[in-house]
Image (cartoon, rainbow, N blue to C red):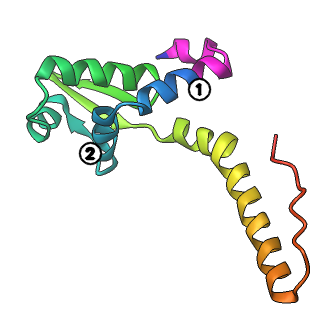
Amino acid sequence: MLYIYNMSIDDQDDALFKALGHRARRQLLDLLKEGPKTTGALCEVLPQLNRCTVMQHLRVLEDAGLVVVERRGRERWNHLDALPIHALHERWIGPYATYAVNMLGALKQAAEGGQPARLDETLPE
């Protein structure tokens, strides 16, 4: 998956959001949090999906950099790579969470002190 390093940040984010946008792919990631699994083992846990569909979802996850595949003989072992999710958190979730906590703190302080809250802070960039 070396080509992912040649993608722009926006392209990487698009691939990541696409990968996380489907329930079945999120289920696969949840299963891989427990540890690497073969494709066959993943298919057994998700009987509502046929093997071809599981493979297609794994390919989307692999293209997004969320799954690393290791081949051992005839088996295909799928490993979770959580670094893209961490990068997503650092760019999108962390700054907004910090902003929300600061705003709630200002609101609480104003409510306890009887002063109007200063809620004119700007959102993080």
Q: Which residue is denoted by mark 2 in the rendering?
A: 31
- The residue lying at 60 percent from left, 39 percent from top is 88
* 54 or 76, nearer to the observer: 54
Q: Element under label 1?
A: helix
Q: Position of residue 37 (x, y in %)?
A: 22, 39
Q: Element under label 2?
A: helix
Instruction: Count neighbours of disc 1 (C-alpha within 10 A) and say few if under 14, some if 14 to 19, many if 20 or more.
Output: some
- The residue lying at 20 percent from left, 25 percent from top is 54
Q: Is residue 7 magenta?
A: yes
Indicate the amino acid at tag 2.
Leu
Q: Judge whether residue 82 can be spotted in this image.
A: yes
Q: Position of residue 99 (x, y in %)?
A: 76, 57
**Does 115 sit above or below residue 51?**
below
Highlighted range, magenta? 2-12
Q: Earlier in the sequence, mark 2 or mark 1?
A: 1
**Does 34 sit above or below residue 53?**
below
- The residue lying at 32 percent from left, 33 percent from top is 25
- Magenta: main secondary structure: helix
- The residue lying at 35 percent from left, 31 percent from top is 22
Looking at the rendered image, the quarter that the C terminus falls into is: top right
Circle on res. 54: none
Q: Is residue 42 magenta?
A: no
In the displayed structure image, the side of residue 32 where residue 62 appears, left or right:
right
Q: Judge whether residue 74 can be spotted in this image.
A: no
Indicate the amino acid at tag 1.
Asp
Task: Verify CB contact (< 8 Å) between mark 2 and mark 1.
Answer: no
**Does 84 sit above or below residue 106?**
above
Circle on res. 13: 1
- Residue lying farthest bottom? 113
Residue 14, image quadrant: top right
Q: How far separated are the C-alphas under marks 2 and 1?
A: 22 Å
